[in-house]
Image (cartoon, grey):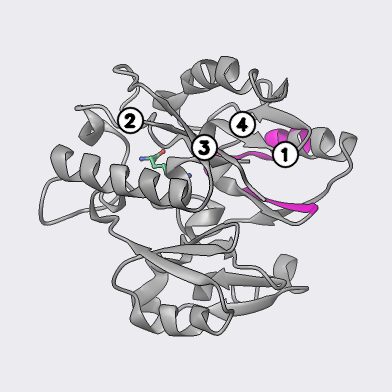
Amino acid sequence: MFTQAIARKPGKNFAQGLTSTVSAEPPQFELLCKQHNTYLETLKSCGLEITLLDPLPDYPDAYFVEDTAVVTPDVAIITNPGAKTRKGEEDFMAPVLAGFRKIERILVSGTVDGGDVLQVGNHFLIGLSERTNKAGAAQLGRILESVGHTWATVEVGAGLHFKSSVNYVGQNTLLVTADFAEHEALSEFNKIVLEKAEAYAANTLLVNEHLLMPTGFADTRKQLEVLGFDIIELETSEVRKMDGGLTCMSIRF
Ligand code: CIR
């Protein structure tokens, strides 16, 4: 059971963050804040206590807190984010998590973004991406092993982060985009494979017995309903414009 979540308010300059998404409408701050608020209220309704941090003016992507740490029941591992403009965000997260867990750190030349790290029970899948390198994955893996977890790496050939394309939805089942449907490293799991047009719905977030998914993906919803979770749809239009989604905006533990 998760009981805590850490989040950070978006800053007014959030649209200066990194993005590869070309959107017809520019990202809107007021709307983002509204959607972020609803997201936090939803996490509360799922039983989580929220620690809400202030924006970091020098880091427009800092509200994507997930990338700055990996938290297990025993330890909080502060990452070394792989994007130049995001390096430093983690130093603001370390003192916050020190209030909850023993702290470990990913050290240079290792890089890890939390968006590449997917926990499935006692096992961690670590995506190797443009943000997470082999050295970082190996450091993270050693720390996870030291507290009794197992881990494996997965090549992320598509999408920004591993969790942009693959998430765990319980019952040994992964929700995956077509790019990951036949991935060797994921062969031991059952899979729900997303339609191409619904690939963004891969970033679905399991919080206790609730499944938070982005709005507007009816086919995916139907497939997820079979699993029997309480499904909550949330509007994510503005974070999507910044390559983000539901998992990115909090650290749950
Ligand atoms: C970035 O490119 O780093 C941000 N604009 C989006 C990060 C999304 N984070 C995540 O998927 N964990």
Label located before the other in sequence (1 or 3): 3
- The disc placed on residue 49 is 3
- Name the residue type under label 2: Lys
What residue would you read off at disc 2?
9
Label located before the other in sequence (2 or 3): 2
- Name the residue type under label 1: Thr
Q: Position of residue 224 (x, y in %)?
A: 51, 78
- Helix or strand or loop: what does disc 3 sit on? strand
Identify the image quadrant of residue 96.
Answer: top right
Locate the C terminus and report the quarter of the image it occupies.
top right
**Horizontal arrangement in the rendering, residue 123 relative to residue 246 (left or right):** right
> What stretch of residues is rendered in magenta?
122-139
- Name the residue type under label 4: Thr
What residue would you read off at disc 4?
111
Residues at discs 1 and 3 in contact (Cβ within 8 Å): no
Is 125 included in the stretch rendered in magenta? yes
Q: Position of residue 168 (x, y in %)?
A: 62, 63
| Neighbourhood count class around disc 3 (C-alpha, 10 Å): few under 14, some 14–19, many 20 upward | some
Q: Position of residue 54 (x, y in %)?
A: 35, 21
- Helix or strand or loop: what does disc 1 sit on? loop
Q: Is residue 244 visible?
A: no
